[in-house]
Amino acid sequence: MTDTLTIRRPDDWHVHLRDGDILRGVAPYTARQFARAIVMPNLSPPVTDRHRAADYRARIMAAVPESMAFTPLMTCYLTDDTDPADVAEGFANGVFTAAKLYPANATTNSAHGVTDVANIMPVLERMAEIGMVLCVHGEVTDAHVDVFDREKEFIDRTLALLVERLPQLKVVFEHITTSDAVDFVDASGPQVAATVTPQHLWINRNAMLVGGIRPHAYCLPVAKREEHRLALRRAVTSGSAKYFLGTDSAPHDRAAKESACGCAGIFNAPHALESYATVFDQEGALEHFEAFASENGPRFYGLPLNEGTVTLERAEVQVVDTIDAAGTPVVPFHAGETIGWRFVG
Ligand SMILES: NC(=O)N[C@@H](CC(=O)O)C(=O)O
Ligand SMILES: [Zn+2]
Ligand SMILES: [Zn+2]
């Protein structure tokens, strides 16, 4: 049995660091484990152009202790009015690493998102030309579609057509939650990849709804049936280069989640790597963990692999009930539970 695990330093290809005080409270948790992170642009107001992205990047750098070598990789929040030239210039200048498609009103702070992918075709065509990655929150927002079917519907109505229309465009289907998404990614060419969160590998929809309604298990896309969780576990541990680590760590004030209309999002940054490692261990697939955490992502994005390593050891770690994120109480994923791996550094 392996009792320590040393891997190339990993990256997080999808994280919400927020802004203001809570940014200072949460960013060090990500910077402690990951060399780089793709930072989501769904602030209020959203990060819709290269100037806002450069300013936000500076605020993130200021929030991370200097002793931590961490590089935030910025994304452009696409709207119906995004200027292709601004996106391309931001990419050329190294301000943007990717652009983010939020279907309007699909999730937290997505009201300014795209109402119809047809509206951003010129931006997407330009991105395909310059090799810039599109990150996608893949859910339809049609009120008639059941919330558990929104990811599958998005594949059928939007994503399949987009990939067919722009075969060169690099697309990350983010935080996938269904076997339908796994099937789609597996059947697509090498320009389509996916991230998977720790929570979707750990919980199914029962975690949210059995024995009481549990707001800290609520995120979007919502956790699905057990068969989907198992399909996600098989996908990430298969050794396929199409899957990589993206936590979707999404902190919200405890009170905003424990509410009559609780916010979507799970704060998993404090023990993200240990949570994933435990899954790979349980599946007998630790040999594929390093590629998932540290290699598949940078190769897909066309970025260098990190130098340096991190080490995990087999040990019982008790996860605290609440974290004080610079004044905001936030409940972490696995709160009150024990995880079987410890992050050494
Ligand atoms: N995942 C979530 O449930 N919430 C995210 C938004 C998102 O990634 O969809 C957030 O910003 O809170
Ligand atoms: Zn999302
Ligand atoms: Zn997210």
Image: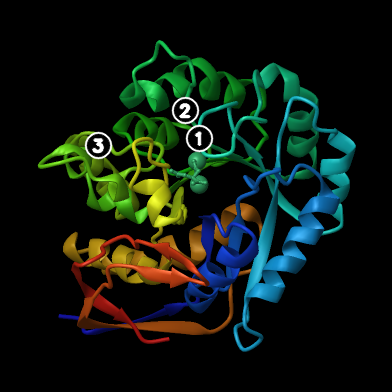
Pointer 1 residue Cβ closer than 8 Å to ligand 1: yes
Which of the 4 image quadrants contains residue 153? top left
State the residue in front, 324 or 86: 324
Mark 2 and ligand 2: say if the CB distance to the nearest ligand atom is below 8 Å: yes
Badge 2: how crowded within 10 Å, few (<14), some, or many (20+)? many
**Would you say 291 lies left or right of 283 here?**
right
Q: What residue type is labelled 3?
A: His
Queried on whether the Cβ of the residue with tag 3 lies below 8 angstroms from ligand 1, the answer reads no
Camera-side residue: 59 or 307? 59
- For the point 59% across and 34% down, which residue is it? 110
Relative image position of residue 19 (x, y in whole percent): 64, 59
Residue highlighted by disc 1:
107
Whole-percent x and y of residue 245?
44, 57
Give the number of the disc on residue 282: none
At x 76%, y 38%, the residue is 127
Q: Which labelled disc corresponds to residue 139? A: 2
Tell me which amino acid carries mark 1.
Thr
Mark 2 and mark 1 in contact (Cβ < 8 Å)? yes
In the rendered image, which quarter contains the C terminus?
Answer: bottom left
Q: What is the C-alpha distance between the residues marked 2 and 3?
A: 16 Å
Residue 126: where, in percent of width, then height?
80, 34
Looking at marks 1 and 2 on the same chain, the residue that comes earlier in the sequence is marked by 1
Q: Nearer the viewer, residue 243 or 270?
A: 270
Q: Name the residue under label 3.
A: 228
Describe the element under mark 2 as helix, strand or loop. loop
Q: Is residue 178 above or below residue 155?
A: below
Which mark is first along the chain, 3 or 2? 2
Q: How many labels does the image show?
A: 3
* Colouring mode (rainbow / by chain / secondary structure / one colour): rainbow
Structural crowding at the residue carrying mark 1, measured as other residues with C-alpha within 10 Å and reported as few (<14), some (14–19) or many (≥20):
many
Circle 1: element type: loop
